[in-house]
Amino acid sequence: MDQIKIKAEVRTEHGTAAVRRLRQTGMIPGSVMKMKKGGTELIKMPAHDFMMAMRGHASKQLLVTLDMDGKEVPALMREMQNDVLAGTPVHVDFSEVSLTEKVRVTVPLYLVGEAVGVKIGGGVLEQTLRTISVECLPEDIAEKFEIDVSALDVDQTMFVRDLKLGDKQTIVTRPEIPVAVVKAPDDMPASKGGASAESEKSPEVIKKGKEEEKKA
């Protein structure tokens, strides 16, 4: 994984109004949970530099190096809050980490390949689990896992226990949880054609009912 370095500095601004003014000057407020000292340290980062550093990175849990006045601090990006309308980051939380101690992170799962049950059997592939929890050293954090489902046939399910993520990650998610399944065509909802056929019968039923009323 490429090293992500972010320049940051300690901030004294806090409170809603002060933080709003800080953002107006092109800075992003954040915090770092300190591992060695304990407690939390408030920081701020140039918004442009931060967004440039994040380009091409989809995961929200990344190992970064915070450049704090020349001192490099390894940290795990835990949470990034974005502006609802603009989509730009408005606050970022980090946790200081040791590069020799394992951490627990949540990593996205992406399905790759065309399942044989879809290609030949006409089934439909459904992804039932989109993230997985693993433990690993900070430098071994993966931004995503690509799961090959090409061997999955109709009515077959892939479970967490079937995943092979490598020796560097230990899976924490329960093994019996399903990840993906190929459903048979018979399991799919009724087509619109079926609904139309039923609706075509309705006028006849209504008409018959009225005729019976007249006879009565």
Image (spheres, rainbow, N blue to C red):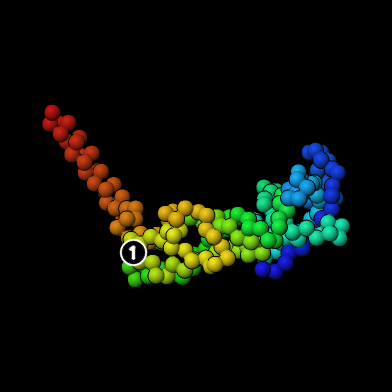
The image shows residue 114, relative to residue 127, as above or below, that is below
Q: Identify the residue at horizontal 52%, vertical 54% (top origin).
A: 172
Give the side of residue 35 with respect to residue 154, left or right: right
Q: Nearer the viewer, residue 8 or 123?
A: 8
Q: In the figure, residue 57 lies in which quadrant?
A: bottom right
Q: Position of residue 155 (x, y in %)?
A: 33, 61
Question: What is the crowding at mark 1: few (fewer than 14 residues within 10 Å), some, or many (at least 20)?
Answer: many
Q: Residue at x 44, y 60 (%)?
A: 161
Classify the position of the C terminus by image quarter. Answer: top left
Could you tell me residue 53's position as x and y percent? 74, 63
Left or right side of 30 for 144: left
Quarter of the picture containing the N terminus is: bottom right
Quadrant of residue 60 within the rendered picture: bottom right
x and y, in percent, of residue 211 in the image: 16, 36
Labels in figure, total: 1
User: In the rendered view, would you say 113 is above or below 88?
Assistant: below
Near-viewer residue (98 or 29): 98
- Which residue is at a point 84% across and 49% down the rendered structure image? 10
Residue that mark 1 sits on: 154
Asked if residue 12 can be seen in this view, the reply is yes
